[in-house]
Amino acid sequence: MKSFLLASVTLLVLLLFVSPVIAAKKIKSLCEVRYPSDARVAWECLKLKWTDTPGALFGEHWQDVLRFNRMDRRHFFGGRSIKVPKRFEEITNFTPLPATYPDAAGEEKFILVDQSETFLGAYEYGRLVFSFPAAVGIKGHRVPNGEFRIDAADRRHKSNLYTIEEIGRRYPMHYGLRFYVDKSVDGWPSYWIHGRDVPGYPASHGCIGLYDEEMQRDYYSAYDRKVNKPYYHELKEPFLDAAKTLYQWVIGSHNDPGKFHKIDYGPRVLIIGTPPL
């Protein structure tokens, strides 16, 4: 009995540490994923063809359309349906987050994560300076709501226990920013903000994931070409690199050794809302 309980606790800890590894429910139509801000934009549903690319379909607005769908280019593929605004000007530099957050007006840096919108925003003295779509936790493995603080960073964080199934490499959690250690659970599972793929719906098992297309190219491109999945015909610079942007903003002018290190200057993190699925 004791060994069974120990194994159960160990499994829970592993799930929290390496959230992206275990497959979440895959959604074929992002039109089914509804956010509060959808009501502000007139849109229609479009089923993609395998020959479609964001650039070819949407021109200079391709990043805005991906942001509106909370997805990256690896998940833009034939057979998937996405939301397409009827007027692109309505989603230029799209964000559903407030331009100001008065509660953080006295803070040099502050991070807001709204799980109902699956978006993360970075604020300076209460003013939004940038924001990005975020992959949050699936049902049963939600990212905890509440107030936290970034207390550790690791530019090339990786899972010590899990690999990417298709290629056998340790799962990357690049540009990792730790915001919570749950000391109420044996093993003290950690919660991070880090780079990963962003599919357009909740997909993690406890962490908050941001765009990291450079990692995806390095880790997935050979495998995807092998199985004839043409995700990479447009996966070139400019990369969607939200995780890197947030990491560099948090570190600022402080020394970064490039490996795991604790920090005492990390911004406050406020997580609110309930994911749409």
Image: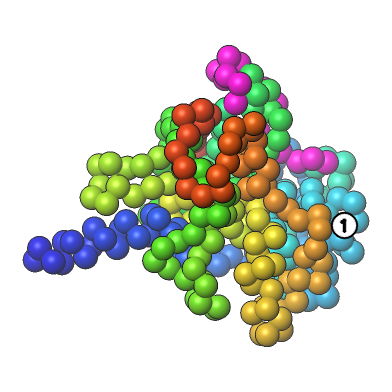
> Is residue 141 placed above or below 165 in the rendered structure?
above
Image coordinates of residue 128 in percent, x first then y, are 69, 28
Q: Quadrant of the N terminus?
A: bottom left
Farthest top residue in view? 106
Magenta residues span: 92-109
Farthest left residue in view? 1
Q: Which residue is found at the position 81% from the left and 72% from the top?
A: 233
| Residue 264 in sight in this render | yes
Q: Which residue is found at the position 79% from the left and 48% from the top?
A: 64
| Residue 156 appears left or right of 161 | right
Determine which residue is flagged by label 1. 58
The kind of secondary structure element at disc 1 is helix
Residue 119 found in image quarter: top right
Q: Is residue 97 magenta?
A: yes
Judging depth in this view, the residue of 44 and 239 nearest the camera is: 239
| Residue 36 appears left or right of 144 | right
Image coordinates of residue 68 in percent, x first then y, are 72, 48
Q: Residues within 10 Å of mark 1 (few under 14, many from 20)?
A: some
